[in-house]
Amino acid sequence: VVAVVTLAAGACSGEDAPAPSPRERHGLVPLPVEVVHRGAGFTIGEDAVITAPPEAERAAGHLAEAVRDVTGRTPRRGGNGAIRLEITAGPGTGTAPPGGDEPADAVLVDPADEAYELTVDAEGVRIRASRPVGLFRGVQTLRQLLPAANRAGTAGETGATGEAGTAGKTEAVLPGVRITDRPRFAWRGAMLDVARHFFTVDEVKRYVDLVSAYKVNVLHLHLSDDQGWRLPVRGRPELTRIGGAGEVGGGPGGSYTERDYREIVAYARERFVEVVPEIDMPGHVNAALAADGTLSCDGRRREPYTEIEVGFSALCVGKPEVDRFLADVIGEMARLTPGPYLHIGGDEVEKLTEEEYARFVGRAVELVGAAGKRAVGWQEIGGARLAAGTLAQYWQTEGSPEDALSAVRQGGKLIMSPASRTYLDMKYDDGTRLGLRWAGLIELEDAYDWDPATTIPGAGDGQVLGVEAPLWTETAETMDDLEYLAFPRLPAIAEVAWTPREAREFGDFAARLAGHGPRWARLGVDFHRSPGVAWP
Ligand code: TNX
């Protein structure tokens, strides 16, 4: 499907529409499938009323908040409002069970489940979708059509559409428009490494807020690594008590309680983002070995590790203590996680034979299945026997992706995270104060200008479930650091995951993105002013 923009009311039917300009798309990121301009727009004022069916409660709540941000008043809810959310029989043709305010996991399979239509005309604003999640994605689009939030009250800023900000105003003027939209890929992920540096519940929530604005629907939490273990496991308090008490550089680290973790999951679900937890095994386990010496072949506890080299640690595969540990860890991840996927890691193991590695990963995948979930692992897991439906996360930049293709041959699908495009921990340029550079420098255009379905020969649209942007945190210690590395590259990758390939073009993207800068500034988001964008 190609993006179509018809200029001004009715004037040019029958002719080819002129090439759409960024402004005509109102600075929308990710770019919707179709944006048609038509007729008069609508003004949302202080008297705005929202009408929504009960199953659209979550989307309606977010909509009300967005309206309050511009009008300064929480809109009334009731019948016959000018802002309407509607559940329809179409356009979704997906496989999720109908009805209900279902969580995002229902939509990790078929992008049609997230489709929506957003109309603004003289009558008002209407968002229609076959599922609540589609309504929520439509609300996120509407937020970008609204002028930048008014709450801070700063004068003189520019909204995403290029208009003046709303300082002092209590209404928002929306253009007449009809947007028809659905994602290209079902899985649009953001990974956060809370192991190399620990991030608090509030920081993770803020990251969820920032990424869900760009229609990200998966938060992959990298919860363990050599430097830290952040997830509590019942009956094994030493994992967090000892394994959680450190991080890169020697800081205090930290870990989540069960309640913390559940709070993150609930907060993400409230925004139709599914949490996928990762415990990285059988390598990247020094923190576990520091907590429990029985997991090592020599029975000795390791010293805590605060450097950033990888590949040196491994569980003692074949030991009964390790089998019990694996079962406990997977059982606990399954118990704490309502979503359908558990990530078992599996990357960069240098200390095991291929047989040991394959035995361990095969067993882990079996246990995930027995717990009623599907397994995800880094691409190396393709070297093991996998259950159908297992996901392999491609992260290489060169070399033969034989392991990823092996996962596909076994009935799996791929999550595309090629490091040279999607690794948010790479430096932008030589001057970037943070970040690593092993996968190259990644400026905005590099993050944008690639196609997930042509990256690996033999893995096209049918084999790729989606795209994910990992944010490893060896060099990122604070929320500001996370924001600086993620913005503006994360929105670029979110568009790669959402928008049809043929509708994407970097110059157009950069022009649409420019107005997001002032919005981030207003939210206190520290972002990189990529030179390819004419930031206002
Ligand atoms: C590779 S990619 C890793 C991580 C590092 C990252 C740093 C992958 C599966 N593993 O352990 O944090 O590079 O860029």
Image: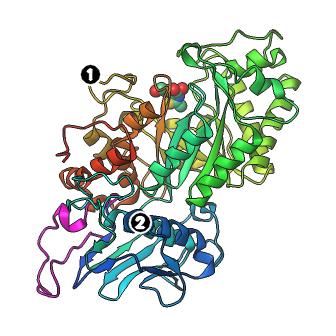
Residue at left 57%, top 25%? Answer: 196
Say which of 15 and 350 sits in front: 15
- Specify whether residue 13 is painted magenta: yes
The N terminus is located in which quarter?
Answer: bottom left
Determine which quarter of the picture holds residue 248.
top right
**Above or below for 187 versus 19:** above
From the Cβ of disc 2, is ligand 1 less than 8 Å away?
Answer: no
Q: Residues within 10 Å of mark 2 (few under 14, many from 20)?
A: some
Horizontally, residue 350 falls left or right of residue 367, namely left
Say which of 420 and 20 sits in front: 20
Disc number for residue 72: 2
Which residue lies most toward the front here? 168
Q: Main secondary structure of the magenta part?
A: loop
Q: Position of residue 7 (x, y in %)?
A: 15, 77
Pointer 2 with pointer 1, Cβ within 8 A = no
**Above or below for 188 versus 435:** below
Horizontally, residue 335 falls left or right of residue 534, namely right
Query: Which stretch appears magenta?
Result: 1-30
Find disc 1 in the rendering and name its residue: 431
Q: Position of residue 260 (x, y in %)?
A: 70, 42
